[in-house]
């Protein structure tokens, strides 16, 4: 059956180079074949095997456990975010899958990621969004909600308490007149509803990160709600 990153691709959790296909086989079966990366786990519970689009594949939960052994922490968070968004997994189903594999490194690593990450909160849709999120994390700024519905729009980044919205402008999409008109309309709606929109381009995020962080830090400080709430008239 498909497993690991190839299973993640089949479940639409990630885009994966199809040159090498990950396949899980029972112990001591099968032989090496060009283009296949064969895995022979000591344990694969029946409950962690299924089919999708008529293709034998590991379940989403088992797929995440397997991928936890071969991808970095942020990549694993993105897989988790996508699995939650698509409705393939939740904390209960993941907890059960992890409990069935107490000695597997991927299960332990997935548990640690779940302890610190709230799945679904950082579901980026582009490499530019991912780059900006990484920049925000490295700077130690408060983490935003990502790709959140706000009125008639889905905004890239939102700091709800500060009412700051950040949109990322890719190199190609926002060069078209129609895209610019939609951006103006979105910004007008945000301003009229009490939000402060900021826009950062590909060049700013990748070539002038200090400029981005400076503008964002200033906006967050300026719009931070006062501690203890608004003062009364007597105060």
Image: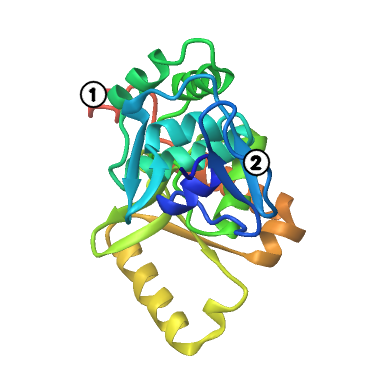
Above or below, 174 relative to 109: below
Q: Residue at x 41, y 83 (%)?
A: 181
Report helix, strand or loop for mark 2: loop
Farthest residue, direction top:
102
- How is the rendered protein coloured? rainbow
Q: Tell me if I can see residue 159 in this picture.
A: no
Look at the image and tell me in which quarter the C terminus lies: top left
Instruction: Give the CA separation, mark 1 to mark 2.
Output: 81 Å
Label 1, residues with CA under 10 Å away: few <14, some 14-19, many ≥20: few
User: Are the residues at dot 1 and dot 2 in contact (C-beta closer than 8 Å)?
Assistant: no
Residue 124 rendering spot, x and y as whole percentages: 48, 51
Residue 40 rendering spot, x and y as whole percentages: 58, 29
Q: Nearer the viewer, residue 102 or 76?
A: 102
Farthest residue, direction bottom:
177
Q: Quadrant of residue 172?
A: bottom right
Query: Residue 170 got which mark?
Result: none
- Numbered marks: total: 2
Residue 94 rendering spot, x and y as whole percentages: 36, 25
Question: Viewer-nearest of labels 1 and 2?
Answer: 2
Residue 12 rendering spot, x and y as whole percentages: 42, 53
Q: Residue at x 23, y 59 (%)?
A: 151
> Counting residues from the N terminus, which is met first, the one under dot 1 or under dot 2?
2
Report helix, strand or loop for mark 1: loop
Q: Nearer the viewer, residue 234 or 82?
A: 82
Q: Is residue 172 left or right of residue 220?
A: right
Above or below, 214 relative to 92: below
Residue corresponding to mark 2? 31
Q: Residue at x 67, y 36 (%)?
A: 138
Q: Tell me if I can see residue 52 in this picture.
A: yes
Label 2, residues with CA under 10 Å away: few <14, some 14-19, many ≥20: few
Q: Residue at x 69, y 62 (%)?
A: 204
Residue corresponding to mark 1? 234
């Amino acid at each position: 059956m498909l497993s690991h990153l190839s299973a993640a691709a089949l479940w639409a959790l990630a885009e994966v180079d199809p040159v090498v296909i990950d396949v899980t086989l029972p112990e001591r079966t099968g032989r090496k074949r060009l283009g296949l990366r064969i895995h022979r786990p000591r344990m694969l519970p029946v409950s962690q095997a299924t089919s999708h689009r008529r293709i034998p594949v590991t379940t989403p939960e088992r797929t995440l456990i397997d991928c936890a052994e071969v991808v970095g922490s942020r990549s694993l968070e993105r897989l988790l975010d996508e699995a939650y968004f698509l409705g393939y997994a939740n904390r209960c189903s993941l907890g059960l899958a992890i409990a069935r594999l107490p000695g597997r490194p991927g299960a332990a690593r997935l548990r640690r990621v779940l302890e610190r990450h709230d799945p679904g909160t950082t579901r980026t849709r582009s490499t530019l969004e991912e780059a900006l999120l990484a920049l925000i994390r490295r700077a130690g700024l408060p983490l935003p909600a990502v790709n959140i519905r706000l009125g008639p729009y889905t905004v890239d980044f939102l700091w709800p308490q500060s009412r700051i919205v950040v949109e990322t402008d890719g190199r190609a999409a926002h060069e078209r007149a129609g895209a610019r008109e939609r951006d103006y309309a979105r910004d007008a709606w945000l301003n009229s509803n009490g939000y402060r929109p900021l826009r950062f381009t590909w060049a700013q995020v990748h070539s002038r990160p200090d400029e981005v962080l400076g503008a964002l830090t200033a906006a967050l400080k300026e719009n931070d709600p006062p501690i203890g709430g608004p003062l009364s008239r007597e105060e």
